[in-house]
Image (cartoon, rainbow, N blue to C red):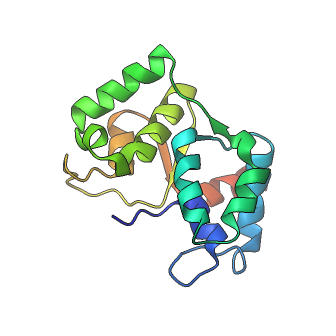
């Protein structure tokens, strides 16, 4: 299963990704500044997924070493309770390892009152077999934005 990761899309600089930093340097600068300041965080599972991408994409490994501070562990009881609620509603998150990063991302954002930034697009009818992050976030009242939506919001805040 091919999953799009926002960070991979920027760091790849290849035609199969959406937002190469070589084409969108100003957009990447916004994201990198927020990562450096601690305003953008991610769960450890995302870090593990990025390590897998690092073997194929040269910029990811060095970037990970410089930005390891952004990855946070999950595990307190409130996070585990939210994870259980999501898995009960969408069993794919408990059965399919490929969904673990999405689950942890939503749990972290839901618990910390953060916003999920995703490249996935919600569907009118989401299924339990292939849930979409925007649909699940909406159901569990977790704020969720697309990459362009996030960048627009940041531009409005700083402008």
Residue 31 appears in the picture as rendered: no
Residue 19 in sight here? yes
The quarter of the displayed image where residue 22 is located:
bottom right
**Residue in the image at 48% along x and 46% along y:** 144
At 50% from the left and 22% from the top, the residue drawn is 75
- Residue 30 pos. (x, y %): 75, 58
Residue 94 sits in quarter: top left
Does 81 sit above or below residue 37? above
Report the residue that reaches farthest toward the bottom: 15
Q: Quadrant of the C terminus?
A: bottom right
Residue farthest toward the top in the current orientation of the protein: 77
Image height of 4 relative to 18, above or below: above
Report the front residue among 132 and 11: 11
Image position, residue 112 (x, y; %): 57, 28
Tell whether 128 sits left or right of 16.
left
Residue sitting at x 36%, y 33%: 140
Direction from residue 87 to residue 46 in the image, left or right = right
Tell me if residue 8 comes above or below residue 114 in the rendering. Answer: below
**Residue 102 x %, y %:** 43, 46
* Foreground residue among 155 and 27: 27
The location of residue 78, given as percent across then percent down, is 46, 17
Q: Residue at x 69, y 81 (%)?
A: 23
- What residue occupies the far front of the structure in this picture? 55
Total labels: the figure holds: 0
């Amino acid at each position: 299963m091919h999953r799009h990761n926002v960070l991979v899309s920027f760091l790849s600089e290849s035609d199969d990704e959406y937002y190469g930093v070589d084409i969108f340097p100003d957009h990447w600068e916004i994201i990198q500044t927020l990562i450096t300041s601690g305003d953008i965080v991610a769960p450890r599972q995302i870090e593990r997924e990025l390590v897998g991408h690092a073997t194929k994409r040269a910029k990811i490994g060095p970037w990970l070493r410089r930005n390891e501070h952004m990855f946070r562990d999950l595990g307190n009881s409130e996070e585990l309770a939210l994870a259980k609620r999501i898995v009960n509603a969408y069993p794919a998150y408990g059965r399919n390892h490929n969904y673990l990063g999405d689950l942890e991302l939503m749990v972290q954002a839901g618990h910390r009152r953060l916003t999920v930034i995703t490249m996935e697009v919600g569907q009118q009818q989401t299924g339990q077999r292939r849930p979409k992050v925007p649909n699940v976030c909406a159901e569990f009242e977790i704020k969720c934005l697309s990459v362009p939506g996030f960048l627009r919001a940041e531009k409005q805040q700083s402008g």
